[in-house]
Image: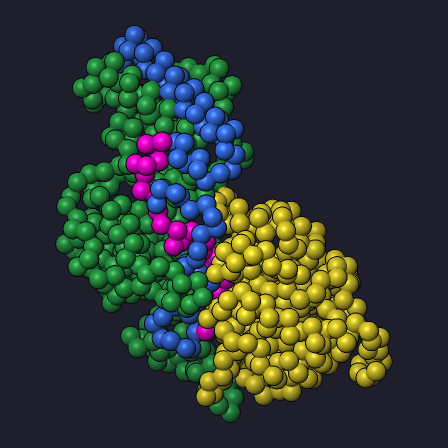
């Protein structure tokens, strides 16, 4: 067995899902004995069999990756409950093993993946999707790039064909439920961090009865970073359409048309809203020069 | 959008950009790198729900210790999550 | 001996790992710490609080980068995005040397996020040394490779772990981050004399030393970094210092993290070995035999 073959063999064994009581599977999907497989490349010692030595790595792998994903989606966990959430995370990771050098990216595909997996909570699937999207938006806003904001000098030749670039950390969400309230409630109910205690990194279980009741009601959120703290800012429908168009690369004039294309506001009312949107956005430094490269 | 309406909209955008930028620049000049800058942003920030700082200092890759055999089902990979703030916690939290 | 080309001819003393629960204390109390070790991957982001915090630390303290996912022993090419981000970070921290592990952890673009043991083969020596050279050339700073704790051994191995380490660092012409806790853990798991290991490493290549706590189970020992350093590890440390001279030393404490003062005090216990060593001549060696002064 050469180096690559050994690494492929071991990676496959280490990343194989555990049994329900967190042991290494006795057999592979095709019925092969994992003990026999382990024997082919791992030495036993006087205390542990090849299977048991491999199992240490198998268990470590799953504890580590499930913990990393669970940490990024506490509100999904609070709504689902521990057992269903564990199943969801395990299923997600089984289909989406890490393809990045950093654990930071491990949950990135979960919102999209969840779209095609309503089985974890069929009745609340849309709600869960919204929560997952918001929780991942938080991660993106938390450490996305923050470029130099535009200054008054940059607006000199602004026209209908001008492009305005949004800060990379800004995440725009069109949600069916006011899940910002729920996510914040989950955070508030999480015990305050005791920095000297392990308790801070144990998974907190939120009693579902204490979470706000969610009634379907569309909201638009800008999840963004200001002075290195992440904020959830609700924006109205037109502002959302405007910002989304600008974020997608649409020039200013067409973006304004997209924003108000379906509205019944008078031109004066539109102008007042537009002025307010741009004032707020530029006050927060949301417009920037395009990212190099 | 008719030409006149588009002109009005562009003028409004321009006015907003200049006005907002001026507020931001003034706030920075008055209180450089100060957490109270958020208060100068006025109602805009107050309307925002600050995401609590639980995740604010996570270091996901801190997982150096290999505690995989200790607590089945629990995350033994510490150094992630729970942290105090570094002083820039939003004052309107 | 402490200042050598593998640690940028620096003269660092006792440091601790920079960990989130200690941020408040560090910024409020500004304790005197010789240096901090950071986990590189936590700061290989585009923006946000992690980088802001790092910059604050860099204003006051010396920082050395330690990575957890370079996987020098993985048999496939390094991730260019990883390398690019790592180089950007080294420019920020001005780390005099950079360390990562003598292990593998990814294959075919999938990451286990674990420090998996190498088969100690000549094929692995060649591949690993080539990878280290490639990374060292790209980053343009000295690299030190760290021996890992392991729980499995391979039938394929053709030499001992310390022979493998020596072959790799000679072929790569790189430094060693000697983790004496890892040596102890592996010695108990694989039934070898840990002093044989310490006595065999090329002293002139040791750039840094790691100390840490571990956890003993019925049939094996785990490298948990959740305890003070145990006596057998201090004994190995004493022997290592005797051989290599006073060397940059870092305490790793990653789980059940106590107060800053407790961690720092534990680390500073190393000075009882370092201080006497500073007044002694380096241990001379002849034909591989250790000569006590």
Examine the structure image and report whether residue A170 is included in the region drawn in magenta: no
Q: Which residues are magenta?
A: B42-67
Q: Give the image's coloring scheme.
A: by chain
Task: State the quadrant of the C terminus of chain C.
Answer: bottom right
Percent coordinates x, y for residue A89 in the rendering: 31, 61
Relative to A95, is C55 above or below? above
Relative to C2, is B27 above or below? above
Q: How many marks?
A: 0
Name the residue nearer the viewer: C20 or A69. C20
Percent coordinates x, y for residue C42 in the rendering: 51, 55
Relative to C198, is A136 above or below? above
Question: In the image, is A69 to the left or to the right of A8?
Answer: left
Task: State the quadrant of the N terminus of chain C.
Answer: bottom right
Q: Residue at x 32, y 11 (%)?
A: B8
Residue A292: tell me if it is visible. yes
Percent coordinates x, y for residue C7 in the rendering: 72, 61
Figure colour of chain B: blue
Can you name the residue that lies furthest to the top here? Answer: B4
Percent coordinates x, y for residue C157 in the rendering: 60, 79
Spot the yellow chain and give its letter: C
Question: In the image, is C171 to the left or to the right of A145?
Answer: right
Residue A266's quadrant in the figure?
top left
Question: In the image, is C107 to the left or to the right of A244?
Answer: right
Residue A64's quadrant in the figure?
bottom left
Figure colour of chain A: green
Q: Residue at x 39, y 79 (%)?
A: A34
Residue A91: tell me if it is visible. no
Q: Residue at x 77, y 59 (%)?
A: C9
Q: Residue at x 58, y 47 (%)?
A: C55
Examine the structure image and report whether residue B48 is included in the region drawn in magenta: yes
Name the residue nearer the viewer: A12 or B1. B1
């Amino acid at each position: 067995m050469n180096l690559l073959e050994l690494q492929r063999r071991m990676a496959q064994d280490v990343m194989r899902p555990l049994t329900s009581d967190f042991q290494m599977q006795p057999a592979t999907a095709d019925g092969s004995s994992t003990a026999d497989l382990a024997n082919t490349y791992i030495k036993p010692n006087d205390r542990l069999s090849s299977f048991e030595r491999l199992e240490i790595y198998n268990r470590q792998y799953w504890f580590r990756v499930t913990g990393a994903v669970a940490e990024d989606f506490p509100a999904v966990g609070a709504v689902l409950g521990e057992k269903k959430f564990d199943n969801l995370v395990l299923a997600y990771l089984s289909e989406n093993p890490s393809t990045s050098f950093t654990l930071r990216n491990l949950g990135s595909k979960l919102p999209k993946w969840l779209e095609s997996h309503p089985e974890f909570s069929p009745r609340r699937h849309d709600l869960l999707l919204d929560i997952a999207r918001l929780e991942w938006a938080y991660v993106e806003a938390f450490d996305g790039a923050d470029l130099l904001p535009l200054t008054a000098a940059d607006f000199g030749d602004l026209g209908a064909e001008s492009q305005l670039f949004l800060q990379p950390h800004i995440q725009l969400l069109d949600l069916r439920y006011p899940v910002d309230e729920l996510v914040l409630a989950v955070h508030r109910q999480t015990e305050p961090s005791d920095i000297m205690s392990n308790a801070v990194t144990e998974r907190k279980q939120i009693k579902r009865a204490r979470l706000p009741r969610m009634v379907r009601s569309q909201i638009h959120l800008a999840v963004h970073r200001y002075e290195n703290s992440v904020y959830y800012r609700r924006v109205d429908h037109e502002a959302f359409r405007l910002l989304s168009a600008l974020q997608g690369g649409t020039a200013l004039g067409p973006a304004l048309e997209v924003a108000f294309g379906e509205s019944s506001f008078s031109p004066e009312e539109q102008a007042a809203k537009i002025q307010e949107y741009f004032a707020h956005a530029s006050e927060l430094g949301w417009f920037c020069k395009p990212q190099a490269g | 959008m008719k030409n006149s309406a588009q002109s009005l909209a562009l003028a409004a955008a321009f006015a907003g950009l200049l006005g907002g930028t001026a507020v931001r620049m003034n706030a920075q000049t008055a209180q450089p790198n100060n957490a109270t800058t958020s208060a100068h942003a006025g109602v805009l920030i107050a309307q925002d729900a600050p995401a609590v700082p639980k995740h604010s200092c996570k270091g996901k890759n801190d997982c150096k210790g290999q505690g995989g055999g200790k607590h089945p089902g629990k995350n033994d990979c510490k150094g992630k999550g729970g942290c105090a703030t570094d002083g820039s916690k939003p004052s309107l939290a | 001996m402490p200042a050598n080309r593998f640690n940028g001819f620096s003269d660092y003393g006792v440091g601790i790992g920079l960990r989130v629960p200690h941020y408040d204390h560090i910024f409020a109390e500004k304790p005197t710490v010789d240096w901090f070790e950071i986990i590189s991957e936590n700061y290989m982001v585009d923006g946000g609080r992690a980088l802001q915090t790092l910059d604050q630390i860099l204003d006051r303290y010396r920082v050395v980068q330690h990575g957890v996912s370079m996987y020098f022993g993985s048999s496939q090419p390094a991730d260019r995005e990883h390398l690019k981000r790592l180089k950007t970070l080294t420019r920020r921290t001005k780390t005099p040397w950079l360390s990562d592990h003598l292990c593998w952890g990814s294959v075919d673009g999938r990451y286990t996020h674990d420090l998996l043991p190498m088969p100690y083969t000549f094929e692995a020596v060649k591949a690993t040394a080539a990878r280290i050279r490639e990374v060292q050339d790209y980053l343009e700073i000295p690299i030190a490779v760290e021996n890992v704790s392991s729980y499995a051994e391979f039938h394929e191995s053709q030499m001992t772990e310390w022979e493998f380490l020596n072959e790799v660092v000679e072929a790569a012409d790189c430094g060693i981050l000697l983790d004496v806790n890892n040596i102890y853990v592996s010695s108990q798991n694989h039934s070898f004399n840990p002093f044989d290991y310490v006595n065999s490493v090329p002293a002139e290549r040791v750039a840094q030393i790691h100390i840490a706590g571990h956890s003993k189970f019925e049939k094996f020992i785990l490298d948990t970094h959740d305890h003070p350093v145990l006596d057998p590890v201090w004994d190995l440390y004493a022997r290592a210092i005797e051989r290599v001279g006073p060397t940059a030393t870092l305490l790793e404490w990653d789980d059940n993290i106590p107060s800053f003062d407790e961690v720092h005090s534990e680390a500073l216990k190393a000075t009882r070995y370092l201080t006497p060593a500073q007044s002694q001549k380096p241990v001379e060696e002849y034909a591989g035999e250790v000569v006590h002064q």
